[in-house]
Amino acid sequence: MSLTGSTRRFSPLVPQENAGQFFSSGHTNNWAVLVCTSRFWFNYRHVANTLSVYRSVKRLGIPDSHIVLMLADDMACNHRNPKPATVFSHKNMELNVYGDDVEVDYRGYEVTVENFLRVLTGRLPPSTPRSKRLLSDDRSNILIYLTGHGGNGFLKFQDSEEISNVELADAFEQMWQKRRYNELLFIIDTCQGASMYERFYSPNLMALASSQVGEDSLSHQPDLAIGVHLMDRYTFYLLEFLEDIHPSSKANMNDLFKVCPKSQCVSTPGHRTDLFLRDPGSALITDFFGSVRKVEITMETINLTEPIHSFR
Amino acid sequence: MGLLSDPNRRRALISLLTRLNAPICVVCYMAGVAWFMGLAFEPFTLRTYMSENAMGSTMVEERFPAGERALGTGREFSAHKKKAGGMPVDWLVKTMQSRGLEVFTQRFSRRLPFPDEDKERYMVKGTNVYGILRAPRAPRTEALVLSAPCSPGDDNNQAVGVLLGLAQYFRNQVFWAKDIIFLVNEHDLIGMQAWLEGYHHTNTTGMDWSPLQGRGGSIQAALSLELSSDVVTSLDLVLEGLNGQLPNLDLANLFYAFCQKIGVLCTTQGKLQRNDWDSVSGYSHAVQTMMLMVMKQASGRPWGDHGLFLRYHIEAATIKGINSFRQYKTDATTIGRLLEGMYRKLNNLLERLHQSYFFYLMPSLSHFVSIGYYMPAFGLLALILLLRALDLWIQLATPPPRTEDGVADAEQMSSPGVLSVLTPLVISHLTGVALYTLPIHFQEIAVEHFPVSETEAVVLTAIAVYTAGLALPHNTHRLLTGRGTENGWKVLKLVAVLYLAVLLGCTALINFSLGFILALTLVPVAAFVTPDVPKALSAFIMVILSPACTLLFSVFLFQELQEMPVSFLDGWMLYLSVISQGILDHALYGSLVYPLVALLVYPCWLLFWNILFWK
């Protein structure tokens, strides 16, 4: 199967063939599921992490209707926040990642392992509103970002339950069987994060983690006026990297793997690409982080009387 | 067959036990004392560390600016205090209200059982003034307390000044998640007790107080401030509370962390810690600091206004400013910043402090010894009592060697009557009850007949009853049952040794220092007293090791450790005042040391006195 993406120039062939080529590339829509699993004021940085990724993803084009944002606690309105209604990701209050256009879909105690798995697999009760559903199809590229406190093989939700790497792998397999994704990028920023992608076995998954098994992921910088650590290192450098990406950027996954080397992160970030069927170098950042619509302007009229032959 | 069920092996074990009993006891005693002394040796201690995740590290920015203004407020307070001749209630209410707090007052009065040296009257009346800073956005479910005592004379004016300065600064911040209560209490501990009882709707000590009009939610932590000079050279942390209870170690860790961050010298027991733990003088310094803590904890009295909070499961400590002759001085702004940092961190708490230790000893502010490490020292001493009890049990169980006179044997083999054991027990405990109740009840009669003040009357009555007890019981069993039997004293000693073991064990669990000090002196007495040892020498040693003399020696040792040695006469007067203070603490705050010693330890000691004079 040759999936060429949007790099292929339109060759001067028969327009019908071009049209077939046009509709045969990989994904047609993008989704993002961003989860912060920790509550309490001293876990401010996890909420800031998630909101930073949310900000990048929105900036690159994914609309709120295609983002499922789960935040386990409300830092902006916490009584201890000296700057109410703000969540800062850079010290000296340079960047407020909260604002008035942040749409949180699962808030507070709704962020549970059960809800997360139901969102992924689509097994939600009929009364669930659209904003809380992951309505992806077999041509969706999904970005899943998890952050919080984790350990070897598990991620802690809300200080009361855990999700294990086996459960996560099974959930992705369910998604594959139900054709709920085309390609899936999984990023996790916790201690010993690499253990969470060890058990994946479904095709078309690519995973990144902030630290290997046995290592802790460290936080980046405290802000003395607010009194907490604002961000984790990996996501801080990820955010810096993403700030340079714009919708027509050609940066690919290999650049993403280089984000936050050991000298900056202290832990060793890891990644896993063996289940991904394309070459990572040919997968663009905007394939997952942005919602790039393929637009080709043509002055010619194409007569679509015959069925389009796809190049699969 | 098992070790204990095989009769041959059992006999071998028993003979081993009886032969080696005395040497093992001596070894255990020395091991226990050596273990205790070794606790202060730095490689055996752990460095302190913050256990509570929510408090994290010291990363806050302290910005309190108004130290000088706080000192000015302190001077105003002093002037109004002089004018009012006590607590300037109206001025305090007005000042707190102008700072935006919700201000309330509480009146209290207490009739003392006998007037002590400070108050010199029976009735103590006063007013507490407190202002509540409401958290701007939080529900009123939790609170923190900052208190400063209103002392007569020139003491603690700067503390009240800093308290009011902090109140004004805190009022301008929006990040408070808990209410903060600023309390100025009158008559130190009596006022604090009245306020706490009013806040928690309990009345355990029979005090009269007006109910509190304003409350703030459940108190999570409290700090009491004692500051009597404009500049300080060091800050001292006082942890020991009522009945030897200590606050959670995290509070001490928080204080130490901020002292290091801000660069203030901080001490505990008034002694600055040293770095040369491997030298003899460094080690002895650590031992002195630890011994001071042990003695303060054993006395069972609250050594600061914070001591009364601990009973309500509120972690509290007192911070004292000390001005000694050092070059580097810290001003009020820095002290304000330290307190600001501590309160910001306490503000982040989600639950009560519970992650760190509640039972510990501190040879210095940066090292601690937890209960798992110091309890074996007491365990070794208690082991001696158990070995002795086993030895007596074996002796009682084995039949005596047959003599020609079978009839006399039969008499000896019959177990002694319950009466011969019960009588000394009852009489000792009645003497204990007399020691507990007579001093206070008979003070009027004593004052009529002797030219002494009420306090002296109480103390001297106590000493008189104590000494009379020495003369009383050792005649009883002879009066009642004729000549004492050989087994009679063994049964009594067995009962007494087990009684002492249980008593000391329970005391050590609650107040390790008290249990250990009592064990140090009473266990040798219990182990080696029999009717057969030389009477005069043993009687002398027993009196030296009795609780009253232990207290006398402790008073001298305490003064010596604090580098303020006293002459014998001053020491004796101090000893008398310690006794009266102990009785007063029991009546006013419910301290358990005096009833424990009078009703349980002293009768137990009398039982051994009884055994000494059995024949």
Image: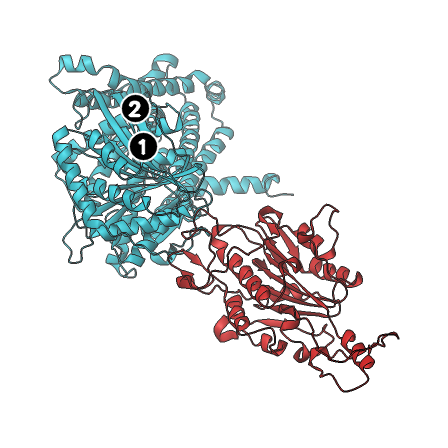
Chain colours: A red, B cyan
Q: Chain of mark 2?
A: B
| In the rendered image, the vertical position of residue B466 relative to residue A93, given as above or below | above
Label 1 Cα crowd, 10 Å radius (few <14 / some 14-19 / many 20+): few
| In the rendered image, the vertical position of residue A7 relative to residue A84, given as above or below | below
Which numbered disc flags the more N-terminal residue, 2 or 1? 1
Residue A302 is situated, as x and y percent measured from the top left of the image, at: 81, 78
Q: Amino acid at mark 2?
A: Ala
- Asked which quadrant contains residue B305, the reply is top left
Give the residue at mark 1. Answer: B533
Residue B479 is situated, as x and y percent measured from the top left of the image, at: 34, 13
Alpha carbon distance from label 2 to label 1: 41 Å
Give the residue at mark 2. Answer: B587
On-image quarter of the C terminus of chain A: bottom right
User: Farthest residue in the right direction?
Assistant: A306
User: Farthest residue in the bottom direction?
Assistant: A12
Residue in the image at 31% along x and 49% along y = B340
Q: Amino acid at mark 1?
A: Val
